[in-house]
Image (cartoon, grey):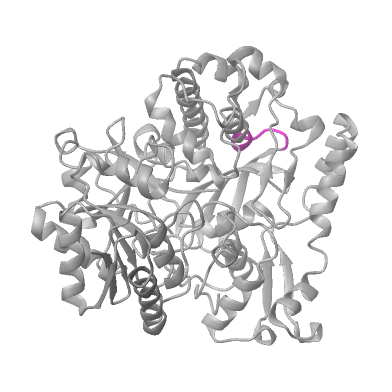
Amino acid sequence: MVDGRLLAAVEEERFNRIKHWAGFPSASIRYVLQEAGVTLADVDHVALSFDPKANLGRKALFTLINRPSIRSLADRLQRQGKTLSLRAQLAAACQVDEAVVRATVHHVQHHDAHMACGFFLSPFDRSAILSIDGMGDFVSTVSAVGNGTSIQKLGEVFYPHSLGFLYNAVTIYLGFPHYGDEYKVMGLAPYGEPEYLEEFRRIIFPKGDSFELNLDFFTHPRNGISMSWDEGSPCVDAFHSPLLEERLGPARKPCEEVTKKHENIASSLQRVTEEIIFHQLRKLHEQTQLNQLVLVGGCAMNSVANGKVTQETPFQHLYVPVGAADNGAAFGAAFHVFHQSLKQPRSFVLEHGAWGPGIDDDECEQAVRAIEQRTNTTDSELASVRVSRRRHDELLDHAVDAICDGKVVGWFQGRMEFGARALGNRSLLADPRRTDMRDIINLKIKFREKFRPFAPSILEEYVSEYFEIDEPSPFMERVLPIREEKRAVIPAVTHFDGSGRLQTVSRRTSPLYWDLIDRFRQCTGVPILLNTSLNENEPIVRTPAEAVSVFDRTAMDLIVVGNWVAERC
């Protein structure tokens, strides 16, 4: 971030291809400095989204009362110890002497970084703020009010009580063990009924302005949460107690069938999560009397709950940033330092997510030529590949014709998106009108569970024609009800319960993607494309070669990489 404006943001997983990788982001640091046109010696401030000194009194009191296991304390100390040599790690990442690093290092409390990411980058001068997470710096939830360049905390929920921990624990119980699998449970929930809601209301319940967990259902107060991430994706061990299985039955193993019971548990979890969030928001509105809300933290990735905020609470306007989870806390920490520590005015609104590496025409050509040569000169059973370079209008027409013919099209354009969701630059696109398209992509390209939904990317001018709410959702951050008469028109992006995870596309911020969808509208009368990320059980692709590799190893029909097209003959 330079002079109050975000210039570049990227996650290390896009470079090393390890999903949710949590080690030191050396390649990312080199990229953002290069993109900004500066060296490490030019950097004045470095901000981190955690503070080991935060809430030391509460940590000590908890340790004294609960006597957590030695293993739990050792794990925490080991994780914190890895942050002590920051200057040396920065210098090593940029291959310079440590003496070059003159920046002031700031440790920003975790939820302060979340709230800065949301409020300071929002269009609101004043708003209520709710940061609701798993846990960061011994805090799971913060309510606050933002005004100009200040944020005033109104309330906090401390360890071990956490809505994010509940969702994570039940996600693992349901047999989805990988870090970040909560979105699978959210996608499964509409298939079930909240049969176990009363049981979940005994596990988590409102208390005052916030909530508490029934800790009898968890092991983390005593044993902590065991997480490992060395040289790989973060891995979290189960931390529900035997009592949860006594009440809900045995935990599902990852290889076992997903049954109606599992669907009902997912539905009950989602319902109680919404109840707790809406309880907090109603209390927050009573305190602030504001109509604007900023929602951040890992639980703000619950797009189903987000979509109901303006119906279930008095808030009328909602902003959820593209980096609502821990990834966005990186630039939240930077903006916290700029506005809170340096007392600088606001001048920037985060309106799009394209902050990563861009594309190079030569790289694009090399990637498509390589796959053309391999498939056309070997004895492979794969169909041969035809490559062509096309002008702007030809490119749009060719892609739209393919989509209308029922083909799945890879779309690799511009700068890579930040965050978990492809927003039209690193996307797989298809016709939302086809009833079979969701199964085709899930089973033949993405190789994932068939209950997982896909997002509708819609021209923002047509939202009210297809959705029951006319609100912008540029970061695919809200699931909203599709108008009943339109559900049969766009079945591939209509979820089981008649909803869609909406992405509104602006001509001003995404002109090429807007043009593509508009060309599809002109051909079909439907201003929507099915959009999912361009990857296959891996992080979203970063380079043309990675994009073409997904095309090569899946049943994708055609890929557009910059101005180049590769398609199966």
- Judge whether residue 342 can be spotted in this image: no
| In the image, residue 548 above or below residue 183 | below
Q: Tell me where residue 548 appears, x and y as whole percent.
A: 40, 67
- Let me know if residue 413 is in the magenta part: no
- Residue 121 lies left or right of residue 399; in this view the side is right
Query: Quick one: quadrant of the N terminus?
Result: bottom right
How far across and how far down the image is residue 17, in percent? 56, 61
Q: Is residue 435 above or below residue 385?
A: above
162 part of magenta stretch:
yes
Percent of width and height locating residue 190: 38, 28
Q: Residue at x 66, y 53 (%)?
A: 110
**Which image quarter: residue 167?**
top right
Front in this rendered view, residue 543 or 130: 543
Residue at 47% x, 29% y is 270
Magenta range is 159-165
Please identify the quadrant where the C terminus is shown.
bottom left
Identity of the residue drawn at 40% across and 80% down: 366
Horizontal side of 88 relative to 422 (left or right) equals: right
Q: Position of residue 319 (x, y in %)?
A: 42, 52
